[in-house]
Structure formats: C-alpha cells, structure tokens
Image (tube, rainbow, N blue to C red):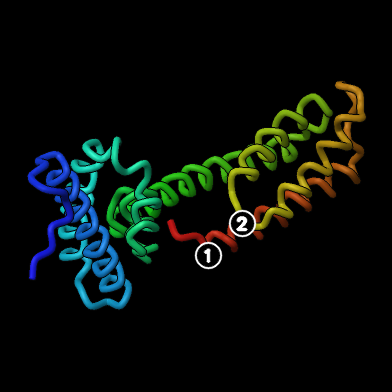
Amino acid sequence: MAVNLWNGNDVLDREMYDRFADLYAIIKATERLEKAYLRDIISPAAYESECSKLISHFKTMVPFLDDTVPSVEQFMGTYKLKCPAALNRLVTSGVPATVEHRTAAAASANISAATVAECTAHFVTVLDALRLNMVAADELYPLLFDLSNSLSKLSILPDLEGKVKEWMEMLSKMGAADKLTEQQARQLQFDLESSYNSFMAALQHLKL
C-alpha cells in the first residue's frame, strides 16, 4: 500500500517530499555504485558514466533544497542513511573517482617532472661553478639557495636539502668576498656529487 508523505492536497508538501525521495535515491544509488567500483564489479568507464549522471542530478537538485535541507549530512542523519562513500563523492569530491585519480596523477607527474628538471639544472650549475673555481661566498650562496629551494619542492630524500643548507649556513657566516679553502671546496664538491648521485638514483621511484 502506498503511503503519502505529505498532508492533504498541499502541492508544496508533495513537491518537497518528492525531492526528498529523489535525494534519498541518489544517495543510495551513489553508495552502491561506489562499492561496486571498489570491488571491481563495474568497469571504470561504466562507473564514470553513471557516477557523472548521479553527481549531475545531485548538483541540479541541491539549489532547490536550501530551505528544507540545511545540509546533506543532516538529511542523511534524519533518514538514517549510512552512506559515507556517497557523501564523499557527492559533497566532498564532486567528481567520479576515476576523474579524481586521473587529475591527481597528472598534476603529480607535471609537478614532479618540472621539479626534477629544475633540481638537475641547479645541481649541474653549482658543480660547474666549483669546477671553474668559483669559491667565493657571494658566488656560491645564491646557487646553493636556488638548489635548496628546488629540493624543497621534491619529497624524495629530504636529507639532501639538509646537506645543502648546512653549506649555506656556513657561507652565510663568511664575508661576501671570502673564499672556501681548497679542502672546503673539494668537500663541497664531493657532498654535492654524492647528493646528485643519490638524487638520480631516487628518480626511478618517482611515478613521472
């Protein structure tokens, strides 16, 4: 037997509860779809297509619920909807998981590739400077500063940046025209070459 959720013939009540029913159905359908995708029951392409439709319907509906549904979380609590995956997909993310993952992977690859190129260039620049006997504090400090900034953008081997900063700290205590001794210059070159080799070895673990 059908049960009316609105009182009498009030058209506004009927429309409100119709929207509630639609929202309820979207949330439940999204939760089932998310679980199916996680369990590999549905293909990524089919998942993305269906999920995009549900998100679109949800976004179209939300503006009409402002006065009656203060928040989706509250609506779910009122109707005892335990659908965390749907809440994340519809409210927090707003895009299918496949799109989310592609976007994150692309952004990560672009940032990493750019940073790797930047770090490599700065390593080479400092090492070339040392080979040309540029050992004055005001010559080396800016080059090490640029290298340190580049390394700080990369999450691999954070100790490399620490080693560079140790040399920067030492140079900052020297006068601009003061020069490294031959032993200090050789040690700096050795440290940088060792760091560069460790850096290059670590690149194979990056997903570029």
- Residue type highlighted by circle 1: His
* Residue 166, horizontal then vertical, whole percent: 83, 44
Contact flag, marks 1 and 2 (Cβ < 8 Å):
yes
Q: Residue at x 9, y 66 (%)?
A: 2
Whether residue 171 is visible to the viewer of this picture, yes or no, is yes
> Label 1 to label 2, Cα distance in Å?
9 Å
For mark 2, give the secondary structure.
loop
Q: Residue furthest front?
A: 8
Quarter of the rendering containing residue 44: bottom left
Locate residue 154, reporting x and y percent. 59, 49
Residue 89 lies in quadrant: bottom left
Looking at the image, which residue is at 14% across and 50% down? 18
Spot occupied by residue 180 in the image (x, y as percentages of width and height)? 88, 35
Q: Which residue is mark 2?
A: 156
22 or 188, which lies in front?
22
Assess disc 1: are there few (<14), some (14-19) or many (≥20) residues with their C-alpha within 10 Å of its C-alpha: few
Q: Which residue does the numbered mark 1 point to in the structure image? A: 205
